[in-house]
Image: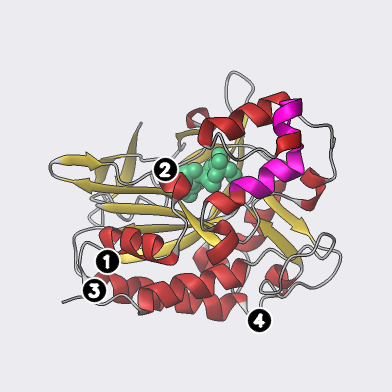
Amino acid sequence: FVQRAETPDGGQELYPWVQLSGHRENFRPGLRPGTVLKLLCPCEADCLRQLTADPLLGEFVPRYFGTVRLEDGTEFLEMQDLLAEFPGCTGLMDCKMGSRTYLESELDGDPKPRRDLYNKMVEVDADAPTADEAAAQAVAKPRYMMWREQLSSTATLAFRIDGLQRLMASGRTHPVDLKRLRSRPEVSDTLAGFLEGRPDLRDAYLARLRKLRAALAPSEFFALREFIGSSLLFVHDQSPGHACVWMIDFGKIRLAPGRLSHTADWLHGNHEDGYLTGLDNLIGLFEDMQFP
Ligand code: ATP
Ligand code: MG
Ligand code: MG
């Protein structure tokens, strides 16, 4: 859909809204310029409301404007459209953070091996099932979810590139199969492509990522919560140094039983998510990025 942004002179500018991941039906145009609607998850709305008001983290999340009910009865949350400041956006990337993308409670569900998960597995890799799984033509959910993480860089770098789009005058480009982007060199090459050979973008993203790191470290909100399935959204356009990163997607943020380091290894029961490990790896990858 097409969005409206307010220009500095009080006029309005139209721009196409681009969604990198998730279900298409979950998003709608906002009720006012500069906002977008996302299908309501009370947990996410509550989290966004607190983060918007958070003195440390507020500047790193889309501003929250409350919930709205549309004519058909469906409820949405209204938040700042992060693309509004980038109507001429040429680069957009979603990095899903953490060394685990499912909640511990999702593992504690029904352990009965499932045929549908087996089918999904062999679709990607016919050799993935064990002999027992192949004989039963079924895979248990915890095993399926852990296998899936090993395919991407989630398990090794504690983040993965979940969506990426470069918008150029000639049209959109679709890069490599992101699902199987796993090794550091592969991820680094993809990030380099995203930066279009521009050191100004690398520097702007690095500055913002370091600032985010410095804000997360002392944050009580962050220390007390498991951050699962949450992303960093990278946006830039063609103006020199015009690039920004925000935290998005808070549907699987849960209070942990105690304080988390966000860097320790996950053991079932300790709720660690590896968020800061992933952020440090991202920062390291940008730091190592050299341009001729
Ligand atoms: P999933 O859980 O499968 O990742 P989701 O339905 O929870 O999907 P999000 O991940 O929150 O949805 O968002 C999907 C995409 O929509 C993002 O990758 C990004 O491209 C876009 N998006 C989300 N929130 C915003 C925002 N506030 N401003 C601009 N774009 C956004
Ligand atoms: Mg997401
Ligand atoms: Mg989500």
Is disc 2 in contact with disc 4, using a CB cutoff of under 8 Å? no
Question: Which stretch appears magenta?
Answer: 133-148
Q: Tell me the kind of residue under disc 2.
A: Leu
Q: Position of residue 174 (x, y in %)?
A: 29, 42
Q: Position of residue 171 (x, y in %)?
A: 18, 39
Sequence-wise, which precedes: disc 1 or disc 2?
2
Sequence-wise, which precedes: disc 3 or disc 1?
3
User: How much space separates mark 3 and mark 1, taking CA atoms?
Assistant: 8 Å
**In front: 95, or 58?**
95
User: How much space separates mark 4 and mark 1, taking CA atoms?
Assistant: 27 Å
Sequence-wise, which precedes: disc 3 or disc 4?
3
Q: Is mark 2 within 8 Å of ligand 1?
A: yes
Of the residues tagged 2 and 4, which is closer to the observer?
A: 2
Sequence-wise, which precedes: disc 4 or disc 1?
4
Q: Which of the numbered marks, if any, corresponds to residue 20?
A: 2
User: How much space separates mark 3 and mark 4, taking CA atoms?
Assistant: 29 Å
**Residue 222 lies within the magenta run:** no
User: How much space separates mark 2 and mark 4, taking CA atoms?
Assistant: 30 Å
Q: Secondary structure at mark 3?
A: helix
Q: Tell me the kind of residue under disc 1.
A: His
Residue where numbered disc 3 is placed: 200
**In front: 13, or 277?**
277
Q: Position of residue 80 (x, y in %)?
A: 47, 51
Decide if residue 168 is on the left or right side of residue 15.
left
Q: Which of the numbered marks, if any, corresponds to residue 272?
A: none
Residue where numbered disc 1 is placed: 242
